[in-house]
Image (cartoon, helix red, strand yellow):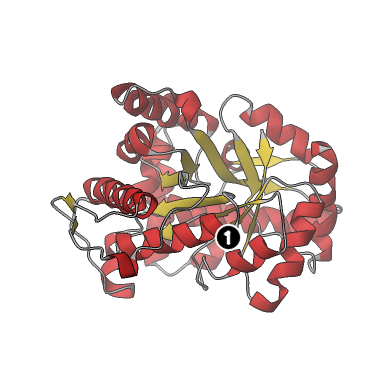
Amino acid sequence: MKFDVVIFPDDLNQMADLAKQVEDMGFDALWTAETTHNPFLPLPLAAANTSKLQLGTGIAVAFPRSPMIMAQTAWDLAAQSNGRFLLGLGTQIAVHIVKRFSAQWDGKPVSQLREYIEAMRAIWQAFQNESGVRYRGDHYTFGVLPPFFNPGPIEHPDIPIYIAGVGAALCRLTGELGNGFHVHPFHTTKYLTELTRPAIQEGAEKAGRSIDDIDLSCFIFVVTGSNEEEIQRNTIEIKSQIAFYASTPSYHKVLDKHGWRDFGEKMNAMTKQNRWDEMWKEVPDEILHEFAVVAPPDELPYAVREKYDGLLDRVSYYFPFDPEDKSRQIIWEHASKAMS
């Protein structure tokens, strides 16, 4: 099992030192998220100041960017990092694509993402072969790539693509086309065992592949701390996250595996009553322990391995790596020691 970190970079000027610290501690990969900042901008700085660390987006939202724009960005990062770049893609949901990004949402996200990936790979092949590009689908069509706009071949042209998702359809698509799958933090081992992995395997078999060809990665919920105050604060944070995701009907399929639909509906009702600050109090410890790994800092990485052995190939904690956060520094140090 590989151990990674995720960052939410607020200051690009600190990125070089941060990435070097992550690499020196022995972590396998550094992932950026598309939240308040662009996920790609930190990665060239990280690549220039590291030599072994894999670098990826966890995730970049696909549809607001043309497949050509995404292909060019990934190509440059793969070249600069000497093949260490991992392209993590997500579909987001309609309201964000249409109203936040003012971008194209065709109402068939799985079909659209399939073509998106196929088109990118056609573009990458054209780059590598210094040729024109031809791709025609229902969502995307490409037919012009003059030599002036073709960057030409690179040493590591096979860029791994990680797909993020929750439902079976995106899992099957990953089995067919993906190199990795970003498991949503809102999951349980039962959900992984009964839905996620079988659906990926189904897609893989359809394409003549195996689930062993695909890395399953996840930023997992953990509850830990060096004292009661830290543990309580962390518990509230994670219960709040669980309550937030449980309030969203599209995630109720995870709760259904445990017969917890009523809990999801209760969380949804509380959001409509604007009772956000109270929701964490309604998350029972039974549900917390299903969705999170609960252990002291020195035992946490081993508890993670025990829970996810055979289910996930790479993990990171849900909270970002931040050397300035002294309360969590010891947590990362224990994770680093566990890998050595």
Question: In the image, what residue type sits under mark 1?
Answer: Gln
| Front one among 278 and 325 | 325
| Front one among 137 and 127 | 127
Residue 176 horizontal side relative to residue 32, left or right: left
Q: Residue at left 81%, top 45%?
A: 336
Q: Residue at left 83%, top 54%?
A: 228
Q: Position of residue 300 (x, y in %)?
A: 77, 40
Which residue matches tag 1? 80
Judge whether residue 120 can be spotted in this image.
yes
Residue 289 horizontal side relative to residue 331, left or right: left
Residue 290 horizontal side relative to residue 183, left or right: right
Q: Position of residue 273 (x, y in %)?
A: 40, 67
Q: Quadrant of residue 292?
A: top right
| Front one among 225 and 118 | 118
Q: Residue at left 32%, top 73%?
A: 101
Against 23, residue 206 (above or below) is above
Q: Quadrant of residue 30?
A: bottom right
Where is the N terminus found, in terms of image quarters? Answer: top right
Against 236, residue 256 (above or below) is above
Q: Secondary structure at mark 1?
A: helix
Q: Position of residue 297 (x, y in %)?
A: 82, 45
Q: Position of residue 76 (x, y in %)?
A: 49, 62
Against 255, residue 115 (above or below) is below
Residue 19 horizontal side relative to residue 251, left or right: right
